[in-house]
Image (cartoon, rainbow, N blue to C red):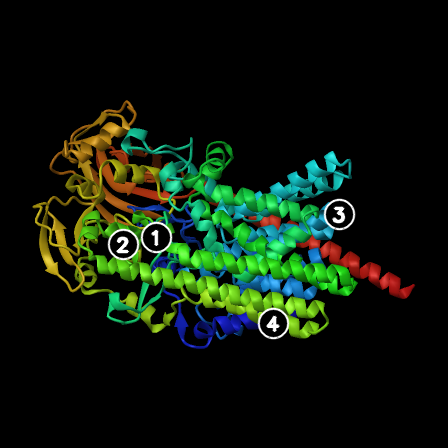
Amino acid sequence: MAIGLLFLSLIVFFYPVIFGGKTFLGPDTLASHSFDTFLAEARSEGIFPLWNPYIFCGMPSYGSLTAGGERGFDLTGYVFGKIVLAFHYLLFAPPVGWVLFYYLVFAGGVYVFTYRKVGDKLAAFVSALAATFSMYIIIWVMTGHNTKISVMAFFPWVFLIVENLRERFDWRLFLVLVVGLHFTYLPSHVQMIFYVYLALGIYLLFFLVRNLVKKEDWKGVVRAGVALAAASVIAFAMDSDKYLSVLEYNPYSIRGSGPITEAAIPGSKSASGGLDYNYATSWSLSPGEVISFVVPFWKGFGSHMYQGALTQNVPTRVNSYFGPQTFTDGAQYIGFVVFALAVVGFVRNRKDPFVQYIAILMGFSLLVAFGKEFPLVYDLMYYYFPFFNKFRIPSMILVLIQIFIPVLAGYGIASFLKQRAENKHGDIQKTKKMVIRSVALVALTCVILSFSYESFLSKQDMQNMASSLYGLGLPKDRLIEQAFQQIPQEVFRLLKEHVVTMVTTDLYVGLALLIVAFGAFLLYLENRLSLNTLAGVLVIVVLVDLWRIDYKPMHPEDRQQQATIFAAPDHVQFIQKDSSLFRVLQFVGGQPPYDNTLAYWKVQNAYGYQGAKMRSYQDVVEVVGLYNPLLWQLMNVKYIFNDQTDSSGAVSLVYSGRQAKVYTAREFLPRAFFVNRYQVATGLDILNKIRSLEFEPQDVAYMLEDPKIEIAPPQPDARAAYVRNGLHGFELDVNATGDNLLFLSETYYPVGWKAFIDGKETAIYRLNYLFRGVVVPPGRHKVEMQFEPRGFSLGKNLSLAANVIVIVAFGYFGVDYFRIRKKNNTG
């Protein structure tokens, strides 16, 4: 019944997207759909999509976790995928139907886990509701962060299994742990997987130290840790095609290596082999934002509907967040009542070892989430903890708080129910007085905060508020400092009035719900309210508390709108008439947008969006900049899309569309051309030469190391033409007049790419920092390049073997179970 009601709550909450013909069209959702045609092209070529030529002049697709294909060799994963698909069709196949499956798995896991801890079904059910509809967790499906819930769905189940293994080892349970970890790895959100292990690691460490100090049995903790490690190895093998590809790519990505020089980015610092510090900490939670856990509009909240004088009373969706994070779609709201119940749960169960563990985990997570805003713990993790410096968004670790606060709330509910069962009059009267005093204190605090909130707003807060709310949702960097000087004081007054109203509403609505919930508990303790009535009140209060906030960023649109978004605009249609091989660059507001939509129309973009782009490409962006005619030549950029008029002289206008103007680069070069000679230079020198337009691409190419080769300048008869250009390889018809150096405007990536001249492998050289080249001997030749990374090939075999072993093991224990059962029945 509990699982059924949790499922029903998801159906009701997401009714518009299940039955109302709606869907979510956030930037990350659209970004994933941008590669639909790329994946379809891979299927038509009969290949697994390992390389993506449509963004950044080409980059690993699978190794960067941008996209992947169907993994038939992963037998258990394949079956699991079909189960998810069946659930999707059970809900009449809405676009997010498959995501709701993971929310249901997560909700069920929290329910079972909490019930195991507190032994009460009502408490477990409310905890599951609270965790599922916690703002930070439920918003994932709205913003397209679907891999986060796909990972965390299995976290409570994995945790429960590890706990059971700590008490008693069982081979069948161990196999279930293997499969649970395997399904945790499948979505490939490495940062969320890291937090799963971080929580489990702190759990095992806490209980190991505690048991050693108290001279209690510590062997169970070690046993659970060994079992977790062994299961992780097997689960990794089941997904090794993916993660071996990631490990291959990591040293060449921005998450695996630092910038070419610290001097290239003023004020930057990075740990060895990790992200730049400033980039990694862009989404750091400020200590002042902690109050938004219970007062969601304290820092402006995020995305919601605004209707007021600033929009001539027209309802308009805005993002009013004004905290220090780059932006955010919603506050880390846990729930006013849920948080209060969690405080009760901690206070009444503070001697429980698991409650102590939760407190330590949440305190640690909060300190890490502060990032650069309070770097005491974050910097230690960033510089010294393995893999941590490869992750950005410190506030993402708050997912652990969003899960364990509801679990603590379950402890609080269970303590009230237990007290009534014990029926000790003195204790009940003491509790009654304590509750009344506590609620009165909360009420006084709410009143004080409502009247004093304006005093907490700084001038910077008001400016940030203006850049978001007054900008009607535009990114902050689109409103420059001068704009603030042009905003009338009346606008600032209206902005402040809006936020103050929302904060006051948060405080008093939360207080009212708190009074209802704790009043119901007091009536229950006095035998004036039945358990069923209490359950109804609690569920309604928690859902009202959470849903009134959860619905604010929820903005589903008609499903047909997606087709409209991906209808090629006229400026794209214009360049699609050109059948030659080229790339494009687009500029919006003077900057290249983080956008992969061009890939949907099979237009190769020299830029794009990827959170783990290649380090060499990022170095080019940071040192050279993308508005550079020499770089355009090297990148094979023929067309420039611009929403502004470009009179620089580097381009010529060829088409003026409704959304963008189309320019051609005046100095366009083909995808492949011969170079007279090469020189050796450092990476930074090469990039600076490109930035200052110091050389002619057809005259000289720069290498980082001297290959000690002789190059002859090409004669007029030399030529190179593409005859095939696929996703994983291409072929050129080349006529060389000597040992000619052929420049290829393809991203240099040494892992997996192989070059062949007439079927014989030849060396690939790194030219002009980012690109490739080969030396072609005299005469006419077939020059080919193929992408064949070893990690994927090896991983496929490991995955298949590990799957077979796990399935056979399950089969053995299944047969053994029925054999024993039959023997017992016969006896």
Q: Distance between the residues labelled 2 and 3?
A: 55 Å
**Residue 419, picture quadrant:** bottom right
Between 286 and 303, the residue placed more toward the observer is 286
Q: Could you classify mark 1 by the number of other residues whose Cα lies within 10 Å: few (under 14), some (14-19), or many (20 or more)? A: many
Amino acid type for the residue under numbered disc 3: Glu
Report the amino acid beneath label 4.
Answer: Val
Disc 1 vs disc 3: which is toward the camera? 1
- Residue 742, quarter of the rendered image: top left
Q: Does dot 2 land on a helix, a strand or a loop? A: helix
Q: Which of marks 2 and 3 is nearer the N terminus?
A: 3
Q: Residue at x 33, y 63 (%)?
A: 498
Q: Which amino acid does label 2 sit on?
A: Ser
**Mark whose residue sits in front, 2 or 3:** 2
Residue found at x 27% / y 71%: 313
First in sequence, mark 1 or 4: give its number. Answer: 1
| Marks 1 and 2, the one that precedes in the sequence | 1
Asked if one can make out residue 363 in the rendered structure from this viewpoint, the answer is yes
Q: Position of residue 624 (x, y in %)?
A: 22, 37
Q: Do the residues labelled 1 and 2 touch (CB within 8 Å)?
A: yes
Q: Which of marks 4 and 2 is in front?
A: 4
Sooner in the amino-acid sequence: mark 4 or mark 2: 2
SS under mark 1:
loop
Q: Check disc 1 and give the amino acid type.
A: Phe
Question: Which image quarter holds the C terminus?
Answer: bottom right
* Picture coordinates of residue 577, whole percent (x, y): 17, 61
Earlier along the polypeptide chain: callout 3 or callout 4?
Answer: 3
Q: Write down the residue under mark 1.
A: 322
Q: Mark 3 points at which residue?
A: 167
Q: Name the residue under label 4.
A: 537
In 3D space, how far apart are the residues under numbered discs 4 and 2 (Cα atoms)?
41 Å
